[in-house]
Image (cartoon, helix red, strand yellow):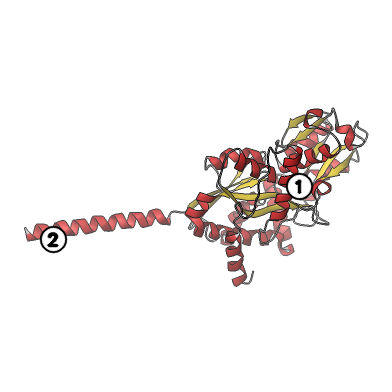
Amino acid sequence: MRKRSIWALSALFAAAAAMTAGAAAAVAKPVKIVVGWVETPGHLAPLVAALEKRDPAIMPNDGKAYRFEPLHFRGTTLEISALALNDIQVAPFSDAAFALAITNAHLNLKIVADVLQTGHPGYFPGEYVVAKNGPIKTIADVKGKRVATNAIGSAADSDMRVMLHRHGIKNSDFTTVEAGFAVQPAMLEEGKVDMIELLPQFAHNLMATGKYRVLFTAAQVMGVEETILWAMRSDFIAAHRPAIIDFFTDYMRAVHWFLNPKNRKEALAILSKVTHQPEKNLQFAFTKHDFYHDPYLVPDIAAVQRAIDVDAKIGVLKKSIVVSPKYVDLSLIRAAKKRLLAHGR
């Protein structure tokens, strides 16, 4: 009986040890972090993934603490449902999309990082382009015309509607045509629309023809603007904070790499491969002719609030929200910055 008891206890301890080992393995499983993106190099996520393939040491915690994956979307508003369903864990939102995710989708979100900003002196201002000899001579002439937008409620879409509203043009006064940024220049050339939202990567070929001109810029609409921010669900942050800090530390290191002029040649080669554009069309990238990227991913929260208030005032949003402090958590990027600085970054 005693031997049986000892054997029973041994079996029990072995089972407990196996369960503990299994639990430890489950805890150690990398946290999936899928990051949405719309256009690059404004959104750096796909470039960071391409850089990591060349140099895995740039993100040493990937595959250990977390598993990073970029996922493409046509516009920021389309990512609200993806974030709600946990198909993505990091969503790049315009100010309007962020507010809609809270007021309409009722998500408990935090602004955690910067993606890109518009309106900094000398940087790409965000351009709205028309045919030089076309029907639109002034902003007032947009009334009754066809306007391309990547997605209703996106950053570019909201800025455009704010400017038109200032000139007495309501949403019902023009036709909105949703189309990806990449196809908008061809649509303008073919006469399918009368105005487009032009990104820097598509400006070279279009503006070189001499047939088009900038009607107004996003910088004229809002000044300095937190055009795209990163948002995450509060419950995901609470459940996986250490892994998320590891991710931000690695991602921030990669952002520094792309913004470092010493790496420009290789950075352009990566961008060319990802976008399938020749490097001669990409010389703007990672310079002051590109969008502004904060090197430590710090978003301009005051700019977010200004934009949301304006959007609510003109009806782009049904109501405003008070962003800070309830919907902001910058502790993740602060912790990441501290780690990088400790290693001389």
Count of picture labels: 2
Q: In which quarter of the image is residue 264?
A: bottom right
- Residue at image position (10%, 57%) is 4
Give the number of the disc on residue 278. Answer: 1
Measured as percent of width and height from the top left, residue 57 is found at 57, 62
Element at label 1: loop
- Residue at image position (24%, 55%) is 15
**Quick check: 146 above or below 339?**
above
- Residue at image position (48%, 52%) is 31
**Quick check: 303 above or below 174?**
below
| Mark 1 or 2, nearer chain start | 2
Whether residue 86 sits left or right of residue 117 in the image: it is: left
Q: Is there any visible trace of residue 199 in the rendered image? A: yes
Element at label 2: helix
Q: Quadrant of residue 308?
A: top right
Of residues 246 and 62, which is closer to you in this image?
Answer: 246
**Quick check: 115 above or below 208?**
below
Between marks 1 and 2, how big is the CA–CA gap? Answer: 73 Å
The reply to whether callout 1 and callout 2 are in contact (CB within 8 Å) is: no
What residue type is disc 1 on?
Pro
Mark 2 is surrounded, within 10 Å at the Cα level, by few (under 14), some (14 to 19) or many (20 or more) other residues, namely: few
Whether residue 195 sits left or right of residue 83 in the image: it is: right
Badge nearest the viewer, 1 or 2: 2
Of residues 241 and 263, which is closer to you in this image?
Answer: 241
Measured as percent of width and height from the top left, residue 195 is found at 83, 35
